[in-house]
């Protein structure tokens, strides 16, 4: 797949280093991904979680694992580093390193990550993030993505998608109301409204929701015609020499939805 990444950093379609899938020292997993379609190999639970969140983030267009080699001046010497992920979003290109909090507590490591970030961001169109385990596991992100992941790639009919979008053409509605209005008896499961089918349509970007709130049958659902664009859920945090006070900045909640729905 031909992709025009910004200039300055060469991104490979395949990992630039060998991934040890049978290592006893690593928690390696094969993770389904459609960006593009294929399987991604993760070498730790945090990398697995990163791929899952990136897959469910509709603002993310492409994900590459072990995507490039970077030559970075660290401690007065050139060092060769291979970051964990490259991500292409609607806003631009990003390099991500995933870390556990215990590792990130090391001042020496944080200093190295700051230097890597400088190298990445000296190239126009690129940003660098250190994604901590706690950022990917914070609620409601963890609960929402776990729920959505179970319904990713489930089949929903074109007719059900059209009926659902028609319901939401003017105002947002609660998930339970949408399910009831689109439910049909004696038809294929993919043709009838259900909680699982609604989650699958959220995964595919057919309908939208507020990712800053727990996803339940009381959640407000909308489309691009009746509500705001889907918010980003993949965390982003620039590396810092000192430990951050919090694991991530909160995202503003779209407060107008309930007011519009009640009108």
Image (cartoon, rainbow, N blue to C red):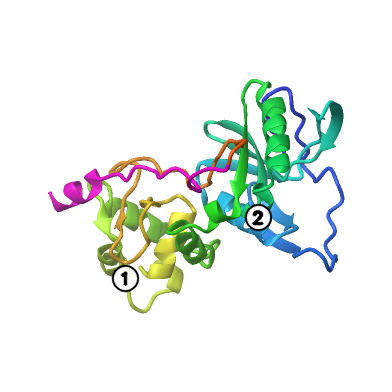
Report the residue at 38% width, 40% height from top.
Answer: 229
Image-quadrant location for residue 111 = top right
Q: Is residue 5 above or below residue 260?
A: above
Q: Quadrant of the N terminus?
A: top right
Evaluate if marks 2 and 1 touch, with contact meaning CB atoms under 8 Å apart: no
What percent of the width, then of the height, locates residue 110? 67, 40
What percent of the width, then of the height, locates residue 225? 31, 41
In the depicted view, which residue is nearer to us: 68 or 149?
68
Q: Which mark is residue 183?
A: 1
Q: Is residue 44 above or below residue 124?
A: below
Report the residue at 71% width, 59% height from top.
Answer: 44
Is 147 magenta? The answer is no
Q: Secondary structure at mark 2?
A: helix
Q: Which mark is residue 22?
A: none
Report the residue at 59% width, 38% height from top.
Answer: 242
Q: Farthest residue to the bottom: give it.
A: 186
Magenta range: 243-263
**Badge 1 density bin: few <14, some 14–19, many ≥20, Cα 10 Å:** some
- Horizontal placement of 251 versus 112: left or right? left
Is 258 magenta? The answer is yes
Say whether disc 2 or disc 1 marks the residue closer to the N-terminus: 2
Give the total of numbered labels.
2
User: Mark 2 sits on what residue?
Assistant: 102
Q: CA distance from mark 2 to mark 1?
A: 48 Å
Q: Is residue 196 visible?
A: yes
**Badge 2 density bin: few <14, some 14–19, many ≥20, Cα 10 Å:** few
- Horizontal placement of 117 versus 210: left or right? right
Q: Farthest residue to the left: give it.
A: 263
- Horizontal placement of 148 versus 81: left or right? left
Q: Secondary structure at mark 1?
A: loop
Comparing labels 2 and 1, the label whose residue is closer to the camera: 2
Q: Is residue 36 visible?
A: no
């Amino acid at each position: 797949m031909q992709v025009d990444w910004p200039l300055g950093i060469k991104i490979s379609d395949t990992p630039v280093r060998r991934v040890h899938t049978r290592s006893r020292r690593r928690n390696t997993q094969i993770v389904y991904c459609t960006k593009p379609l294929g399987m991604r190999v993760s070498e730790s639970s945090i990398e697995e979680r990163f791929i899952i969140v990136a897959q469910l983030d509709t603002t993310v267009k492409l994900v590459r694992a072990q995507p490039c080699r970077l030559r970075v001046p660290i401690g007065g010497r050139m060092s060769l580093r291979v970051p964990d992920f490259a991500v292409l979003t609607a806003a631009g290109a990003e390099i991500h390193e995933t870390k556990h909090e215990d590792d990130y507590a090391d001042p020496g490591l944080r200093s190295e990550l700051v230097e890597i970030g400088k190298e990445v961001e000296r190239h126009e169109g690129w940003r660098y993030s250190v994604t901590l385990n706690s950022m990917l596991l914070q609620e409601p992100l963890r609960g929402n993505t776990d729920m959505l992941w179970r319904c990713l790639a489930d089949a929903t009919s074109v007719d059900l998608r059209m009926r659902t979008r028609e319901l939401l053409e003017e105002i947002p509605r609660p998930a339970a109301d949408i399910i009831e209005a689109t439910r049909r008896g004696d038809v294929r499961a993919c043709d009838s409204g259900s909680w699982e089918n609604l989650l699958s349509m959220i995964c595919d970007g057919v309908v939208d929701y507020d990712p800053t709130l727990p996803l339940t049958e009381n959640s407000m659902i909308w489309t691009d015609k009746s509500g705001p664009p889907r918010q980003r859920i993949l965390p982003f945090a620039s590396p810092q020499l000192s430990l951050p006070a919090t694991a991530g900045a909160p995202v503003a909640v779209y407060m107008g939805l309930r007011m519009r729905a009640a009108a």
